[in-house]
């Protein structure tokens, strides 16, 4: 398990760092590519679980919505029409089903899959609403947009790492074993503590009070854990160990981004509430 985490970091960290260095439009391009790959995995899992879905319509819609959410050129008011557009597009695709009950399931689950994956767009969006960083902040040259992405990455990865080591060392009592048998209460505590420390350091680096980590880190940790459990539920329903085989021996793209699907919109909400 530890070896898998190290290898995954070795595969994903360099391109993510390059994306941050280059900035837009590369951030949105990477988000769109990840949304495409993750959506295909989601819809394959839903089919494996015995549910009819509209894979092509769903994947295309997920990429479009993720890019609309991510792009700084798109007004936030576009969100008013995104949800209706997804519902209409997926409903039209479901009308071709001869069995209305099958069509209804296809409509509901395709729309859900689109919104679920398209939340990746918030990875690029959160910092776009933030105030400019103080000129004296160590990460001031990165700008608010990229700096808040660093906070998101740091929060999710530190929580995951802290939860892994604390769970291995102290984990006895487990929770939600019907979804993911490896989750422990000790892991949650260890992950939250690690996230508070790391997020506090990064907040200081962008000119924010490190005390903000006492609120932000636990909230992002809870969202990341929920995102991981949501994907585990989908895989458990499909009888699958991994979301895909894109990374031989290490699963699919969804296995690597599941925590961000819930944590990214939560970070965006935090920025809107406290960092504008």
Image (cartoon, helix red, strand yellow):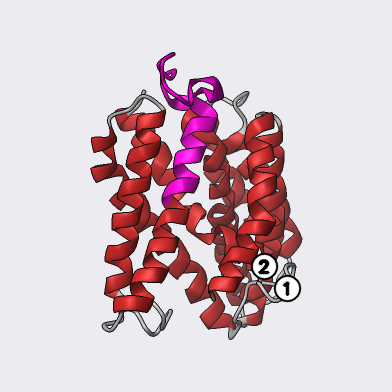
Any mark on residue 245, and which? 1
Q: Main secondary structure of the magenta part?
A: helix
Quadrant of residue 253 in the image? bottom right
Q: Quick one: SS at disc 2?
A: loop
On the question of residue 107 being in view, the answer is no
Binning the other alpha carbons within 10 Å of mark 1 as few (below 14), some (14 to 19) or many (20 upward) gives: few
Magenta residues (range): 129-155
The answer to whether mark 1 and mark 2 are in CB contact below 8 A is yes
Residue 151 pos. (x, y %):
44, 40
Is-magenta flag for residue 249?
no
Between residues 158 and 62, which one lies in front from this camera angle?
Answer: 158
Check residue 252 in the rendering and tell me which mark sits there, or answer none.
2
**Is residue 10 placed above or below 208 in the rendered structure?**
below
Place of residue 16 in the rendered image (x, y in percent of width and height, measured from the top left): 64, 45
Whether residue 140 is in magenta: the answer is: yes
Quadrant of the rendering where the C terminus is positioned? top left
- Viewed as shown, does residue 220 lie left or right of 91? left
């Amino acid at each position: 398990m530890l070896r898998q985490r190290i290898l995954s970091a070795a595969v994903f960290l360099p391109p993510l760092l390059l994306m941050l260095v280059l900035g837009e439009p590369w951030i949105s391009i990477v988000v769109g590519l990840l949304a495409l790959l993750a959506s295909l995995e989601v819809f394959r899992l839903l089919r494996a679980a015995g549910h009819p879905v509209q894979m092509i319509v769903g994947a295309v819609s997920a990429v479009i919505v993720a890019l609309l959410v991510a792009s700084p050129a798109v007004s936030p008011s576009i969100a008013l029409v995104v949800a209706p557009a997804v519902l209409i597009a997926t409903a039209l695709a479901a009308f071709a089903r001869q069995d209305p009950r099958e069509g209804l399931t296809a409509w509901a689950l395709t729309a859900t899959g689109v919104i679920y994956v398209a939340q990746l767009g918030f990875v690029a969006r959160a910092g776009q609403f933030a105030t400019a960083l103080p000129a004296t902040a160590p990460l001031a040259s990165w700008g608010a947009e990229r700096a808040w992405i660093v906070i998101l990455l740091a929060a999710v990865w530190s929580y995951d790492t802290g939860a892994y080591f604390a769970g291995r060392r102290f984990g006895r009592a487990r929770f939600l074993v019907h979804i993911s048998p490896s989750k422990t209460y000790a892991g949650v505590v260890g992950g939250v503590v690690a996230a508070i420390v790391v997020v506090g350091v990064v907040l200081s680096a962008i000119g924010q009070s490190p005390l903000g980590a006492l609120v932000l880190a636990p909230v992002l940790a809870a969202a990341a854990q929920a995102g991981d459990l949501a994907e585990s539920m989908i895989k458990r329903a499909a009888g699958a160990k991994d979301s895909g085989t894109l990374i031989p021996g290490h699963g699919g793209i969804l296995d690597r981004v599941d925590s961000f699907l819930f944590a990214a919109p939560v970070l965006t909400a935090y920025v809107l509430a406290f960092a504008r």
